[in-house]
C-alpha cells in the first residue's frame, strides 16, 4: 500500500505505529502509520478512483516528530474531523494531529 500510494517506508521499530479507520466519506478507508522519518503518514483508499493516495500528516499539520515505537490511534469526531494521537519526541507527551481536509 505504501508503494502504491507513493508513501514512505514504515519505521522498522514501530510495532504499534499503525491505525486504520473508515473515512468520513463512506467510500474511503484511512490508514495512518509511523514512518522511518519519525512522521505520521496517511494513506487513503478511494473506491471511486480505485487507488491509494499518500500524505504526510505531521508536515501538513505542523506537528512534532513522533517517538519511534510510538503507538498511534485515531478517531472521527461529531464534526467529521479526523484526529490522530501519538507520543512525540520533545517531551514524550501525547500529541494530537487534527485533519480537516477533504478526503480522496
Image: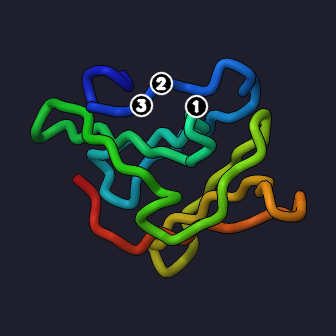
Instruction: Count neighbours of disc 2 (C-alpha within 10 A) and say few if under 14, some if 14 to 19, many if 20 or more.
Output: some
Identity of the residue drawn at 79% across and 33% down: 69
Determine whether, in the image, residue 22 is placed left or right of residue 83: left
Residue 98 placement (x, y as % from top left): 54, 71
Disc 2 to disc 1: CB gap under 8 Å: yes
* Residue 24 sits in quarter: bottom left
* Element class at badge 1: loop
Question: CA separation, marks 2 and 3?
Answer: 4 Å
Disc 3 to disc 1: CB gap under 8 Å: yes
* Element class at badge 2: loop
Q: Which residue is mark 3?
A: 8
Which is more N-terminal, label 1 or label 2? 2
Q: Which residue is mark 2?
A: 9
Identity of the residue drawn at 35% across and 49% down: 55
Return the mark for residue 36.
Answer: 1
Q: How is the image coloured?
A: rainbow
Amino acid at each position: 500500500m505504501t508503494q502504491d500510494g507513493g508513501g514512505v517506508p514504515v519505521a522498522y521499530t514501530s510495532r504499534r505505529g499503525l491505525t486504520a479507520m473508515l473515512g468520513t466519506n463512506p467510500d474511503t478507508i484511512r490508514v495512518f502509520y509511523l514512518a522511518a522519518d519519525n512522521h505520521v503518514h496517511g494513506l487513503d483508499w478511494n473506491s471511486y478512483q480505485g487507488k491509494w493516495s499518500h500524505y504526510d500528516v505531521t508536515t501538513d499539520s505542523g506537528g512534532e516528530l513522533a517517538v519511534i515505537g510510538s503507538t498511534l490511534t485515531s478517531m472521527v469526531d461529531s464534526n467529521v474531523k479526523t484526529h490522530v494521537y501519538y507520543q512525540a519526541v520533545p517531551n514524550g507527551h501525547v500529541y494530537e494531529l487534527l485533519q480537516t481536509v477533504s478526503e480522496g
